[in-house]
Amino acid sequence: MSDVDTEPARGKLRKLNLTMFIPLFTVAGVIVVASDARTWWHAVVLSASALAALIAFVRWTSGELLRVAIPCLAVTGLVWPFSVLVIGGGSAFFGILLVGSFVVPQLPRHRVAAAIALVAYIAAVGATRLLVSHEDVSEELIRFVFVPAAVTAIVLGLMFPNKRFYDVVHELEESREREAELAVIRERVRFASDLHDIQGHTLHVVKLKTALATKLVDIDAERAKQELGEIHALVSDTITQTKELAYAQRRLNLSAELENARNLFEAAGIRVRINREGDVDPEAGRLLGQVLRETTTNILRHAQATRVRITLSEWSIGIVNDGAQHSPLPELRGLAALEQRVVAEGGELTVQQEDGQFVTAASFPGRSSEATEKR
């Protein structure tokens, strides 16, 4: 997430805040110093408060305010009574106002109490001006108490929604990160499923053909050589498919899967009938081919089948076999993982076992209706 296009929203907001408000706060600090300072050392003290406020703001934009909260509050909190009692300036509350409005919403608890305490402190310090001033009381109260307290209360009231806004941005960023992590996990699961489809299927076929070649080696050497040649070709093809999968080039061919399934079933002594009710749409063919491959492996592994019927239409496939065990439906992890991918593409995959038959069906009814409407 370091590229410009994937820069976190908080980073962009930080840059925006720094660009917009650093010049504004700097100018405000200069105005406070210029208007209230009577001597150079007054200017130094007031500048320390303005600098502490700028430091607090910069740390606030980066989410590290609490590390400097105490020293910044201490500096600005001491400069305000100094300005009230010594200098006679009523603008120095600017420092404690900024630092306090940044710190209070960040507190883990008692934020409302802290906000009230901050406003009360600024007002109480401003009221001490009456102890050393001989000016008109009402004017002094307005300048040192009412205005600073009111401005502080308003700014604090605005900062609480601002804090919630930043929390929402943070939550959205976390959601985006979790979504990216889930996408990676989904891709890994998809890759593992494809790898299982390729190599699990092949290993089981190799096992069957090896057993067959072993039986034939003494009674039909030529047929045994043929089976061994097919094993060699199958392993070579699997190596090629694995490489294609690793480089994201693999495309399943439904026609090839049909021919492969027919050969496997016939080699295992299972009669096969294929009914084509229509030409399979290429978009659906990839997933339907995966369903056929996984189902073929499951029939060879788990069923004592003698007959298999495969029915194809433009957007669906159905595989029915006999020899299903009279027991609860076995856990078929390959089909369970494949079902998620079919559903994600807008399809349906169902598995049923009844009257000694096992039925596996996959279809894309949504795509079928869309294709009908286009016609």
Image: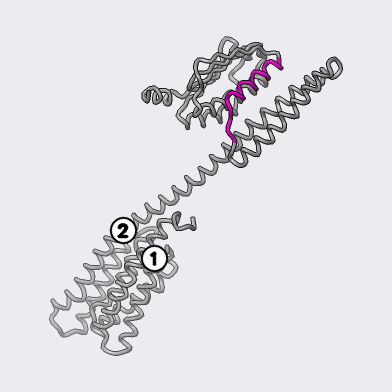
Q: Which mark is residue 236?
A: none
Labels 1 and 2 touching (C-beta < 8 A): no
266 left or right, relative to 74:
right
Please state which of the two labelled residues, at mark 1 or mark 2, is closer to the viewer: 1
Tell me the residue that label 2 is attached to. 160
Residue nearest the observer in this picture, 57 or 9:
9
Residue at point 59% right, 12% down? 357
Q: Which one is earlier in the sequence, the residue at label 1 or at label 2?
A: 1
* Looking at the image, residue 31 lies above or below residue 318: below
Q: Is residue 361 above or below residue 249?
A: above
Q: In the shown orientation, is residue 329 left or right of residue 30?
A: right
Q: Residue at x 51, y 24 (%)?
A: 349
Estimate the x, y position of residue 63 in percent, counting from the top left: 42, 62
Q: Nearer the viewer, residue 284 or 202?
A: 284
Q: Is residue 22 magenta?
A: no
Q: Secondary structure at mark 1?
A: helix
Label 1: which residue?
Answer: 60
Residue 227 location, x and y as percent?
A: 77, 22
Q: Dot 2 lies on which element?
A: helix
Question: Magenta includes 252?
Answer: yes
| Region rendered in magenta | 250-268
Assess disc 1: are there few (<14), some (14-19) or many (≥20) residues with their C-alpha within 10 Å of its C-alpha. Answer: many
